[in-house]
Image (cartoon, rainbow, N blue to C red):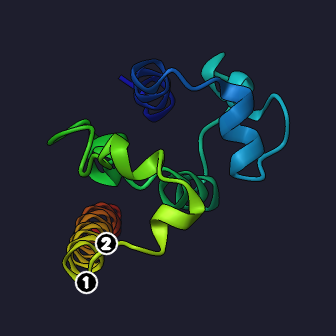
Amino acid sequence: MRIIDRLYQYMELKNITAYSVEHSCNIANGYLKKQWKGKGTLGTEILEKIVHQYVDLSLLWLITGEGNMLVYERPSSNLELQDEEKSYLSADTVIRSLNDKIKLLEQAVADKEKIIALLERQINRKGK
């Protein structure tokens, strides 16, 4: 399965259209459909934009298909809070949220380190 196929699998799970991904990630209209039809590949800049915007999407899974698709699920109740309710969030909630973001960033770093290692092995094979 290709990266773009896994991205479409994620989009289907989250009920997200290609247009909304393109719009939210500042990607040209029609780019994802073109890649899906097999006329190109997703570049690293595009992958970075997508993973930055969709923080629950595992970069490792997206690239390799290994591991879980989702690395983090936001509680739906936090998404529906009104502005005045947000100001009353407890310190524990803020700390929990920050810890979750730290875990996401650590996972992203680990994913990128794995990608770098894979690329280094590939380069070393070509150099031999």
Q: Position of residue 78 (x, y in %)?
A: 38, 52
Name the disc covering residue 101, or none: 2
Q: Is residue 106 left or right of residue 10?
A: left
What residue is rendered at 25% in x and 36% in y?
Answer: 65
Residue named by callout 1: 91
- Count of numbered badges drawn on the protein: 2
Rate crowding at label 1 as few (under 14), some (14 to 19) or many (20 or more) other CA atoms within 10 Å.
few
Nearest the viewer among 59 and 92 is 92
Give the amino acid type for the residue marked by disc 1 in the picture: Ala
Give the amino acid type for the residue marked by disc 2 in the picture: Lys
Q: Looking at the rendering, in which quadrant would you find the C terminus?
A: bottom left
What residue is rendered at 63% in x and 53% in y?
Answer: 46
Q: Looking at the rendering, in which quadrant would you find the N terminus?
A: top left
Nearest the viewer among 25 and 96 is 96
Tell me: residue 45, above or below residue 98.
above
Q: Position of residue 26 (x, y in %)?
A: 78, 53
